[in-house]
Image (spheres, grey):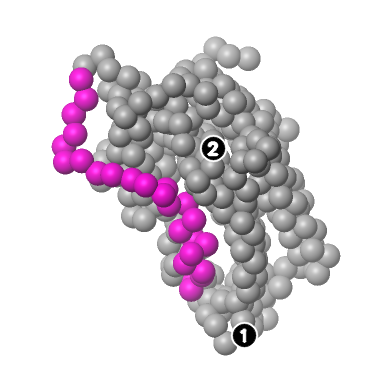
Amino acid sequence: MAPSLNAADTVARVRSYLQGLQLRITDALEAVEGEGGARFLADAWRKEPGETLQGDGVTRILEGGRVFERAGCGFSHVRGPQLPPSATQHRPELAGAPFEAMGVSLVFHPKNPYVPTVHMNVRMIAAGHPGQAPTCWFGGGMDLTPYYAFEEDAVHFHRSCRDALAPFGDDKYPRFKQWCDEYFFLKHRNEQRGVGGVFFDDFSELGFEQSLAMTQAVGDAFLSAYLPIVEQRQGAPYGERERDFQLYRRGRYVEFNLVWDRGTHFGLQSGGRTESILLSMPPLVSWSYQRQHGAGSAEAALTERFLVRRDWLAGIA
């Protein structure tokens, strides 16, 4: 039998927060799409007894929008008979233990190449062997993946992340920023996925209540970190060159999610709902063999100046 979290009211409280966060974010994106624009389809699902996992969730997906070509935001709450390998590499004592997990995960792929793709996730996992109190930990973060990058956008995004984490200790943003840089790295390309943000996993060091509060602070900061960038860039004119480059760079996003991402691996290895797990995939993507970009071009500037590890807030209060 899968473990339950410490109390039913705790489960209900965290679940209610996550469901509310999902709705706040998708409502905000529909407002950006505007009157008559694309709307999210709500796809409720349930894992029935007898399946590998049990639980339920709602996948909210928007496709073919005026601003967002594809935007997926999923809530899930599942229980399973044993943690998959992707979740036990840092907690080997829990190998084979039943687990319970809930979270909200999103990836938004805008239509305009000047608007960056964004990812955000907040989650809680509990696991324990029969007869033992379950161990509970948190994870999450957000990161920005531009195609045509702007210094001020990266600074705004990182400042928002820093300010969200500030109440929980001055060490959190630098630690989680470095963690994000190290995690969202395409080892086979020797390249950063984007300009980063913050990322944390297997986190419980502040105790349950404060670790939960920190995770909520990250989730609550998402809209103010991302939407001002969307509003600034969505009207920028672009042509076939920019669109072609956007589709090419989306290939890197797909490569990371399928080859390296622990969340994708966790979902697939644990028997999760494949359609929901792969909501992060862009609707269109392309690959080119040994593609080169001219010196001094905006395309070359992306890899030379932005897809490198930088202190985006150096000297900024």
The disc at residue 49 is 1
In the picture, the quarter occupied by the N terminus is: bottom right
Label 1 Cα neighbours within 10 Å, binned few <14 / some 14-19 / many ≥20:
few
Horizontal and vertical percent for residue 277? 49, 61
The disc at residue 66 is 2
Label 2 Cα neighbours within 10 Å, binned few <14 / some 14-19 / many ≥20:
some
Q: Which residue is painted at 72% across and 56% down in the image?
A: 19
Q: Which residue is painted at 46% across and 58% down in the image?
A: 278
- Label 1 sits on a secondary structure element that is loop
**Looking at numbered disc 1 in the image, what kind of residue is underneath it?**
Pro
- Residue 71 colored magenta? no
In depth, the one of 106 and 135 nearer the eye is: 106
Q: Which residue is painted at 54% across and 42% down in the image?
A: 65
CA gap between label 1 and label 2 equals: 40 Å
| Range shown magenta | 270-294
- Describe residue 113's horizontal placement relative to residue 235 as left or right: left
Vertical placement of residue 25 versus 302, above or below: below
Horizontal and vertical percent for residue 111? 46, 36
**Looking at numbered disc 2 in the image, what kind of residue is underneath it?**
Arg
In the picture, the quarter occupied by the C terminus is: top right
Vertical placement of residue 46 versus 224, above or below: below
Classify residue 7 by image quadrant: bottom right
- Describe residue 43's horizontal placement relative to residue 19 as left or right: left
- Judged from this view, the residue extending furthest toward the left is 290
The reply to whether discs 1 and 2 touch (Cβ–Cβ < 8 Å) is: no
- Label 2 sits on a secondary structure element that is loop
